[in-house]
Amino acid sequence: RMVKRNMACRNDIRRHDAPFMAVYKSLIPAEEELEKQKQLMARLENLVAKEWPHAKLYLYGSCANSFGFPKSDIDVCLAIEDDDINKADMLLKLAENLEADNFQNVQALTRARVPIAKLMDPVTGISCDICINNVLAVVNTKLLRDYARIDVRLRQLAFIVKHWAKSRRVNETYQGTLSSYAYVLMCIHFLQMRRPPILPCLQEMEPTYSVRVDNIRCSYFDSVDRLVNFGSSNRETIAELVWGFFNYWAYGHDYANTVVSVRTGSILGKREKDWTRRVGNDRHLICIEDPFETSHDLGRVVDKFSIRVLREEFERAAKIMHQDPNPCAKLFEPY
Ligand code: ATP
Ligand code: MG
């Protein structure tokens, strides 16, 4: 009888696959947007090469990790191997060159936590932030993109979760909620933990890619073309996964004692990370380990007020998935 009931539940939830797929498809950026991004990158590469012939430009963040929405700004990292560069001076010089090249709204934010130069390209209409030597972000962008190539359900789930987080205003780090990067890691981890798993743990496999960034060794198995059938014995569909994701974060996760870790593909104890007490501003109320900077908790922006907001939103979403006749409409209702 249990099996029968489970099957009934399954069919019930799968009725919502089509509407969720429609939302997912509506969020995929058009091919011509990617073309415009490439065009802008080429122009920037030209400009940078004139001033710093040894520098390289990399896209990072949502424009390059395959979890980007249409009309996003692009994030660019200027990488230069030189021990005595002064980032502020360099950004000022860069801003000067950008203005001379007719880019608009050019600004050098030299005192920000991550100092950047901002610009808007009048040709494509794209806005862009350029930072210097934030190579770890380039590497974690590649990790996310590689995970996305293994099973399309990751991209489906993460688009739905990001869209939900933006609609419900829980994707605002300056308000104490989580970054898009954190949400994508939560999705990867969730799919690593399914039984049978939908995603492997690339950092636990024999490395085929290895770089050293700021004294951190970043290595993992990146020949993901060989893993495209990895999750095929798990037949769960998008609606089931959205349901499972919110159910986990509403009722299943042990906030008091555990850390989600994509690096190990498992759940760690807060105690083994020494994340049991507040240190400075790190309160560790929801713990998401950065896959490379392992001392970095992506939940550290969350405080005692915003943790309540987040958990209430997870519960709201889980309830909608359990009860609502049309969850897809309700879930994304603006806050
Ligand atoms: P959005 O569509 O919301 O702009 P995004 O993918 O650009 O999403 P952000 O959270 O803005 O996501 O982060 C941009 C990139 O910066 C990430 O892909 C990641 O490489 C890096 N990043 C962001 N936050 C952190 C962090 N706390 N620690 C390390 N890297 C981070
Ligand atoms: Mg971004």
Image (cartoon, grey):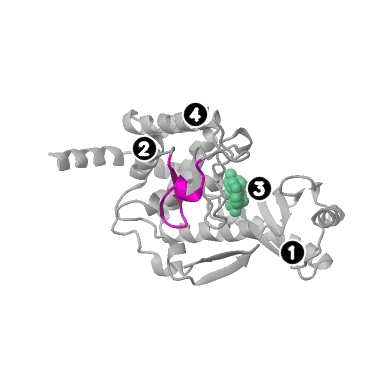
Going by the numbered disc 1, the residue's amino acid type is Glu
- The boundaries of the magenta stretch are 257-276
Tell which of 99 and 254 is nearer to you: 254
| Residue, disc 2 | 247
Query: Which of the two marks, 2 or 3, is nearer to us in this view?
Result: 2
- Locate residue 298: give its quadrant: top right
Q: Could you tell me how far apart the alpha carbons at marks 2 and 3 are, in whole angstroms?
A: 32 Å
Q: Is residue 104 left or right of residue 140?
A: right
Q: Determine contact: label 2, label 3, CB under 8 Å.
A: no
In the image, the residue with mark 3 has its CB under 8 Å from the nearest atom of ligand 2: yes
Across and down, in percent, residue 331 comes to 43, 32
Q: Could you tell me how far apart the alpha carbons at marks 3 and 1 are, in whole angstroms?
A: 17 Å
Going by the numbered disc 2, the residue's amino acid type is Asn
Who comes first in sequence, dot 3 or dot 4?
3
Q: Does dot 3 land on a helix, a strand or a loop?
A: loop
| Residue, disc 4 | 308
| Residue, disc 1 | 45
| Residue, disc 3 | 73
Query: Which of the two marks, 2 or 4, is nearer to us in this view?
Result: 4
Residue pictured at 36% horizontal, 34% vertical: 321
- Locate residue 283: give its quadrant: top right
Going by the numbered disc 4, the residue's amino acid type is Arg
Across and down, in percent, residue 324 comes to 34, 28
Q: Determine contact: label 2, label 4, CB under 8 Å.
A: no
Q: Does dot 1 land on a helix, a strand or a loop?
A: helix
Q: How many marks?
A: 4
Who comes first in sequence, dot 3 or dot 1?
1
